[in-house]
Amino acid sequence: MTEHEHVRVAVIGSGFGGLGAAVRLRREGITDFVVLERAGAVGGTWRDNSYPGCACDVPSHLYSFSFAPNPDWPRTFSGQEHIHAYLEHVADTFRLRPHIRLDSEVKQMRWDAGELRWEIETSAGKLTADVVVSATGPLSDPKIPDIPGIDTFPGKVFHSARWDHGYDLRGKRVAMIGTGASAIQIVPEIQRKVGRLTLFQRTPPWVMPRADRAITGAERWLHKQLPFTTQARRGLLWGIRELQVQAFTKRPNELGMVESIAKRNMYRAIKDPVLRDKLTPTYRIGCKRILLSNTYYPALAKPNVDVVASGLSEVRGNTLVAADGTETEVDAIVFGTGFHVTDMPIADRVIGDEGHTLMETWKDGMKSLRGATAVGFPNWMTIIGPNTGLGNSSMILMIESQLNYLADYIRQLDVLGGRAALAPRPSAVGAWNRRVQDRMKRTVWNTGGCNSWYLDENGVNTTVWPGTTTEFRAATRRVDLSEYEVLRAPERVEDEPVAASGAGSGSGSGSGSEKVEAGA
């Protein structure tokens, strides 16, 4: 990058959100943009998470872009390597490579209110942009709990999202910390190799059978020859999940039958009543993300596996001490403890119009307008922002809805013309979040009796969308200018005398930009 490079749009991240934004920009006729990626390859979380057994828990034909169908998925639930390859394919097919800047980690983004643009500092240089699209995703930065003594552990320690493929687990005593989506995929894979595996479980998950199978050659041939069959398959998968939403959002008590299926899944593999008791959740299914596996419970029943029904509280040399006092000696620790979701690290690198970071602005909880824009951060938009997550369907559906909003946002700026920016009104952000949180009150995520990663430190669900993907698409179809203030930079006066240059200029956070009522 050159010192003074300027682009119309800077996209941060090259996972599904970032590549999707890039494709949509090109489709809108915009080619003056870059995709800034901190790593050496595209793919986001599907590049980083390469742990044994890593796969998606959403069917393949639904976990892909509608504008880039893949008739050649090998399984109904695809593995990490196939999803990563799909994203590489998208980057090539839509000619995104010239726009992608690899090894370009964003260090800071600062809004220049006088010029109405973003100043961006990266590990590869500086640039400016009229609009920033933050697509870093909520599953990008691993979260490792601060365990007393962990720094003095003499063995190997790593997070599931930073798997050390150079470390041989064969014959080792290994501790798996956590029982989330990553852990239940890792456990069956490494159980066969390790000498002894100890699972530290704070809260047991609900685990449903995984209807995974190889997609036959005949099916793949049909999807290639008749593309509408791929669309029909995707539509069926989508429709089934749309019908399920009511139970999660309005009638959680109807989920009892689903719990019975999950219990039967456990009882088939776990015969020990003591172990069954440890593995049986006491909260309503769906309160935490429902997990899918046919191999997790059988692995836990193996003689070389121990389940400690308590979280890790301390490390003393090679000895791990659980909260219930259980002590276990291990050679390696694998953390499957999730990510910074409600406190996304990128928020500490974004500085808005009043000099505050997004992290400071969101100190009492993440809030945005339609999951996209935030008060005090003009011409800044996030993909997979607050309250856009799903508990039962594909995030690609939500991403594509936000791409619709992005496209109309750019169109509105074009219509306004000149140097202009859109800043969401605090009243609009407040009204949107009140509606979301009001709907959240009766959902299973708020009433199910669990403490999940959907909730922030104040117990507020700032993660999940309390409705259908159809409702969200309707809410983000276009930008409502009445929800925004239009900012315009003051016109430059050439050859203005130096003595008069500061006359009448205001002071404070406005930095020279003018606010105009939307539609004026």
Image (cartoon, rainbow, N blue to C red):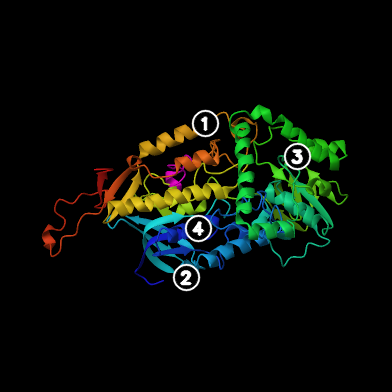
* For discs 1 and 3, the disc positioned in front in the rendered view: 1
Q: Earlier in the sequence, mark 2 or mark 3?
A: 2
Q: Which residue is mark 3?
A: 324
> Height in image: 315 above or below 494?
above
Q: Tell me which amino acid carries mark 4.
A: Gly
Judging by the rendered image, the residue that carries numbered circle 1 is 439
* Marks 2 and 4, the one that precedes in the sequence: 4
Look at the picture and state if 224 lies above or below 455. Answer: below
Residue mark closest to the camera, 2 vs 3: 2
- Earlier along the polypeptide chain: callout 1 or callout 2? 2
Q: What residue does disc 4 label?
A: 18
Q: Which residue in the protein does label 2 denote? A: 98
Q: Marks 1 and 2: which is nearer the front?
A: 2
Distance CA(mark 2)–CA(mark 4):
14 Å
CB under 8 Å between callouts 2 and 3? Answer: no
Q: Are marks 1 and 3 in contact (CB under 8 Å)?
A: no
Q: Earlier in the sequence, mark 1 or mark 4?
A: 4
Main secondary structure found in the magenta portion: loop
Q: In whole angstroms, how far apart are the C-alphas of marks 3 and 4?
A: 43 Å
Label 4: which secondary element: helix
Q: Residue at x 30, y 52 (%)?
A: 415
Q: Position of residue 63 (x, y in %)?
A: 61, 52
* Quadrant in the picture for residue 289: top right
Between label 3 and label 4, give the one nearer the viewer. Answer: 4
Residue sitting at the far front? 226
Q: Amino acid at mark 3?
A: Asp
- Is tag 1's residue or tag 3's residue first in the polypeptide sequence? 3
Q: Which residues are magenta?
A: 359-372
Quadrant including the C terminus: top left
- Report the front residue among 228 and 494: 228
Mark 2 residue type: Pro
The secondary element bearing badge 2 is classed as helix
